[in-house]
Image (spheres, rainbow, N blue to C red):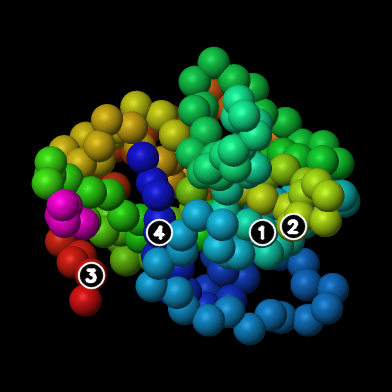
Amino acid sequence: MCASYEAKFSVTQLVEAFDRHGAPLAFPGGLPNIEPVDEVRPTDIARAVRATDTAAAAELAPMRFGFRGPVRPGGSKPPPVINFRSEGRSFGNGETGGRALVPASGFYEFTGDKYPKTRWRLRGADGGFLALAAVWRAGRDGEPDAFALLTAAPGPDVAPYHTRGVIPLPPELWADWLFDRRPAEAMLLPPPAGTLLAEAAPRG
């Protein structure tokens, strides 16, 4: 599963891609400045795309990576929920949560039994950014809105690195996912072989 990802892209790239694939991004306050990030980690604030209330456009919203975790016995602070199993669930849009896409230029997986483990970056074979299927929830008690990445059985490109995988949606499904036009089970499928390329990415 994915505990961190890379976010290196420009807002222009996002605007052009989402417009081309039927999910134009709206920016009522003007285009934001997006800095490239080598690694987005749990509880970091990052950008996610979700439908607006018009159901005709999408927005690029700042959200926290990871839902608030369930309360633990004894009251200890739970870890954030960053990955969310997709099988057997339905996902729709509402005022307090719904479907989302998280732009990423790559995501990280680890292999090995001893520390430090080998870190791998998986990126799109076509060189473009990935749009990872996600769900978002409205923040509570003054907390920001948050997202978790959806996971499924790994495709052939991810299987050598983990027993579960995040789900990069092909561009032709972006609008259907964001605007809840098709059932989740018809879209949340592992990507076919050759969709992703893996390369060793040791930390400096």
Q: Secondary structure at mark 2?
A: loop
Q: Earlier in the sequence, mark 1 or mark 4?
A: 4
Mark 4, residues whose alpha carbon is within 10 Å: few (<14), some, or many (≥20)?
many
- Name which of mark 1 and mark 2 comes first in the sequence: 1
Tell me the residue at 43%/46% (across/down).
168
Q: Earlier in the sequence, mark 4 or mark 3?
A: 4
Where in the figure is residue 11, as x and y percent of width and height? 58, 76
Residue at 62 percent across and 29 percent down: it is: 74
Tell me: residue 89, above or below residue 34.
Answer: above
**How far is mark 3 from mark 1, CA to CA?**
25 Å
Kind of residue sitting beneath label 4: Tyr
Q: Earlier in the sequence, mark 4 or mark 2?
A: 4
Find residue 91 and report its horizontal and vertical position in percent.
66, 29
Give the residue number, with chain letter if any, for mark 4. Answer: 5
Report helix, strand or loop for mark 1.
strand
Q: How many marks?
A: 4
**Which residue has dot 3 on it?**
203
